[in-house]
Image: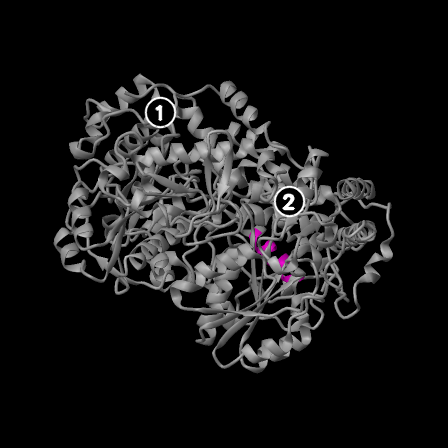
Amino acid sequence: MAKTHPYIPNSDESAIRQMLSEIGLQSIAELFEDIPAAIRSKADLPVPSKMTELETRRHVEGLLAKNLSTRDVLSFLGAGVWSHHVPAAIDAIITRGEFLTSYTPYQPEISQGMLQAMFEYQSLICELTGMDYANSSLYDWSTALGEAARMAARVTGRYEFLFPKFIHPERLATLRTFCDPVDIKLVEVTQDKRSGSVDVSDLKNKLSSRTAGFYLEYPSFLGFVEQAVDEIEAAVHQVGSLFVAGCEPISLGALKPPSDFNTDIVVGEGQPLGSHMNYGGPLLGIFACRGETLLRQMPGRIIGKTTTQDGKRDAYCMALQTREQHIRREKATSNICTNEALLALAASMYLSLLGPKGMSEVCSAILDRTRYAIDSLRKLPGVVAPAFDAFHFMEFTVNFDKTGKKVSEINDGLLKAGIQGGLDLSSYFPELGQAALYCFTEVHTHRDIDMLADKLRMILEA
Amino acid sequence: MVFAQARWDEPLIIQLSRVGKIGFHESHSYDRTVLDLIPSRLRRKQPPSLPEVSEIEVVRHYTRLSQQNFGVDLGIYPLGSCTMKYNPKICDAIAASHKIQELHPYQDERTAQGILQILYEASDFLTKIVGMDKITLQPAAGAHGEYTGVLLMRAYHLDRGEKSRDEVIVPDSAHGTNPASAAMAGYKVVEVPSNSEGCVDKEALKSAVGPRTVGLMITNPNTLGIFERDILEIAKIVHDAGGLLYYDGANLNAIMGKAKPGDMGFDIVHINLHKTFATPHGGGGPGAGPVGVTRRLADYLPVPIVEFDGSKYYLDYNRSKSIGKVRAFHGSAAVVLRAYVYMLLHGKEGLQTVSEVAVLNANYMAQKLRKIKGFSLPFGEGAPRKHEFVLSASLLAKETGVSALQVGKRLLDFGVHPPTIYFPMIVEEAMMTEPTETVSKQELDKMIQAFERISEEAYAKSDQPATSPHATTVTRIDEARANRPKTMQLTWRSTNPTS
C-alpha cells in the first residue's frame, strides 16, 4: 500500500480510500489484478530505500565533489564541447518552470511563449549561418550530421556520402550508424598532412553521379579552416551533389557564413551558445538548409508564424508536421520527437545578449588567445604548434614527436600541476604522431596560457 | 474556475533591436585587430543581423514569453503517453553545480569519478527496474532509444547470419516513433490490428511473424492504458519465429515494482527518463532514452559503457561487437543525474507508490469521465486501465458537433492542458489522458468538472466550445495558414524591420 510522499498528493491513506470507494474498489491491488501472476513482481524493486531531500543532497553532492570541473583545474579541452562563459541571465530564464516543465507545443494557444522563442531560434540560426530555414533542434552535431547524410540521399536518390579524413572521430562513428542500415556508402576524402586542406583532386576523383553529398567541417575538428571552400563547392555541385557544412557556431561571428559558399545543409553543435558542457550532454544539434525542396525533406520540428483565425493577432504554431513521425509514421523524414528545445532557448538568449558586436568580441578574444597560445607553445623545445600550416580558430594541434615524450605522459604531468591538457589524438589519428588538440577560448587568460607553457616546459625538460 | 494567461503582445526580439545596444560585458584587455588575422577570403564581411539589445530587455522579453507558456508547474498537464509529472526542484538544484555543468566529456577519468559513479549506479538501478542485464545511457530521447534498439536487433540477426529478416511488426495502436524508428533502420513496417479488447490480436500476430521478422515493438500497458495480459504468449510467438521483443518504455510509469519487462519476455527496453524519472521536458527536450537489453544482446550495445573494476569507474570502448556510436560522447549526463536523484528520493517504496497512484488517478478519472454525457471509454469499458486511458468524444461529436479538438480547446479556458487528441488512431475522437501520480484529487475533480461543464455546453448548443479558447494568450490559431506555401513563414527575415 502506498506511503505518503511529498510529490504524490494522493498517497495518503484517506485520499486513496475515498477515491477507491468512489469508483467501487476496495484496494489499489485490484487495479493490478489483470497482470498475470506469472509475471507479477513478488519482491521489492532491487534499488535502495528512499532518502530525504537533505540526505539525497548530501549524498549526491558528496559524489559530485569527487569531480574536478573547469573551475578546479585549468582545462584546454575542446574537440566538440567547449568551455565558454554562460551569461547568468540564461540560466535564470531557462530554469523558469513555465519553460522548463512544458513539452512539445501540441496546443499552440497555451504554448505561445515557447513557440515564439523557437521561431526566434530558427531565425537567429538563419542569420548566423546565412541559410534560409532552420529546424528547432536535433540531439547534437553528430546526429544532425547523420540526418544530413540521409537527407542528402533522399533528395538526390544517390547512396554515397563523402567526408574529410580529419573529421571528428565520434561524428564519423555516429554517421556510420545512421548510414549503414540504409546502405549509404561512406567514402573518405584525403586532407593534406601539412595544410589540412581538402585534396581537391582526390575529392574530384571520388565525386560522381553516385555522390549524394560531401561534408566539410568548418572550422575543422583540428581547428584549421579550409580556404578552398569555393573550389570545393564548385566541384561538389558540378556533379549534382549536396554540399553539407559542419559548423562551430561561435566562429561564424567572424568567419564567412556557409551560405557564402552555397552550402545546401548546415549542421553544427549549439552547446557553445549558452549551454554548459555537462560532461557532454545534453547537447544541441543545429540543422539548417536552403531552398524549399530541401525544407520539405528536413528532419525535426519547425515552428511557423501565422495569425489567429480571426486574423487579429500574430501567433505561432508547428508547421510542416506532415514530415514528422506523429503524422507520417514510417514515411516520416526522421523518427525524432523529443528534441533539445531548452538548449535552443538558451542559444536564442545567447545570440540576443551578444548581438553582432558581442559575437565579434568573443571571436576576437578567441583569436587573441589562439594566437598567444601558438606563440607561447611553439617556443617550447621540440614542440610544433600548430602542426598544420593553416589559419586556426580556437583549436590547434600540438605535436610532441621531437620531445621524445608521449602525450599521455605529458598530460599526466600537467594534471599533477592542476592542468587538463589537450585531447590526445594519437589513437584517433596515429599518422599525426604524438599530437594533442588544444582549445583556447575567452575563458582563458594570457596568464593561464603562460602557466600552461611553464608547466609544459618543466615536463619536457625533466 | 478562473484562468487567464498573460497577453503581452510581445514583439520579436529582433524588433526590440536598436543599433549600439549590447547585453554582454565587453572586455578591453586585448587587441581587436586580431580579427585581421583571418585570411580575407574567410572573413565575414557583414556581421550577422542579430538583435542589439541590453540584458534587461532580453530578460523581460523571455520572462514575458515564459508567462505565455503553460507547464506542469502551473497546472494539470495530462498529455497521454508523455507522463507530464512534477519535476522535483532538488533534482535541478543539484544539477546546477559546476561539478556537473563544467565537466568536459574528455577530461581524465580520474577527475570524473563522481559523475562516472553516478552514471554507473543509475545504470544499475534502471537495469533492475526493467529487469534487463545491461544498459546504455547514450540515447538522447525515447525515439533515439528506439532507433538504437532497432539497430541492436539488426546487429543480433546479422551476427547470426540471418540477413533475410527485414520486417518490424508494430500494433496499429503504436506510437508513431515505433514505425518511424524501424523505417530509419531500413526495415519494412508490418502493422497488426488490435482485437476487441484493444490488445494485440494474437491470430493476426501469428500470421504476421515468420522468417522475415526482425521483432515486435510494443508498449505494455499499451497506448489504450490496457495491460497486454497475454504478453508471455505474444513473446513466445515472436521468439518462436526467431524475432526479438522490443519494449517501448513510454508507459513504464504504470508498472514500477508491479511487473518488469524482463519478466514479460522482452529482450530490449528503452526508458524515457523525462517521463518516468521526472527530468523536465524543457519545452520539447532534452530527454534521455537509455536502452536496456538481455544478456544475449549486451555485446552489441553502443560504446562507451560505464564500468567499475573494483577500484575505479571507467568508460569501456573496447567492445568489438558494438553497433558503434549513436551520438557523440557518453550520453546526457546532466539528465541522467537528475533521474538518479529522483530514484534516490523515491527508493523502492516510493517508485512503487508512483505507479500505484498513477494508476489509481487514471482509473478514478476514467470512471468519472466515461459517465459524462457524450463520452465513453471504448475497448473494455469495465476493465481497469493502467497509468492512462483513452476517452472517446465520438458520441458528443455526433450529437452536438463538438469534437475532441474543441473539447481540448475549451479545456484550455479552465487552465487545464488537454489530453493527447486523435491518438491512438483506433479510437474515434480519442482523448488520451495520463494524469500521473503528481496531481491531487482536488485537481482531478476540477478537471472532471471542466469536462462536465463542456458536455453541458455542448448539449445546450452553446457556442463556447466552438469559439474557445478565450483565456489563453491567443485565441484559436490558423494552423493552415502556417502551412500554405504563400503564407508560410518560418523565420523573421521577411518581417525583420531592421533589414
**Would residue A300 be counted in the magenta stretch?**
no
Neighbourhood count class around disc 2 (C-alpha, 10 Å): few under 14, some 14–19, many 20 upward: some
Which stretch is magenta? A118-127
* In the image: residue A356, left or right of residue A428: right
Q: Position of residue A437 (x, y in %)?
A: 67, 52
The answer to which quarter of the image holds residue A19 is top left
Q: Chain of mark 1?
A: B
Q: Amino acid at mark 2?
A: Ser
SS label for mark 2: helix
Q: Chain of mark 2?
A: A
**Would residue A124 be counted in the magenta stretch?**
yes
Which mark, by number, is residue B104? none
Q: Please tell me whether residue A13 is drawn above or below residue A251 in the rendered image.
A: above
Q: Residue furthest left?
A: B203
The residue indicated by pointer 1 is B348
Q: Position of residue B462 (x, y in %)?
A: 34, 47
The residue indicated by pointer 2 is A408
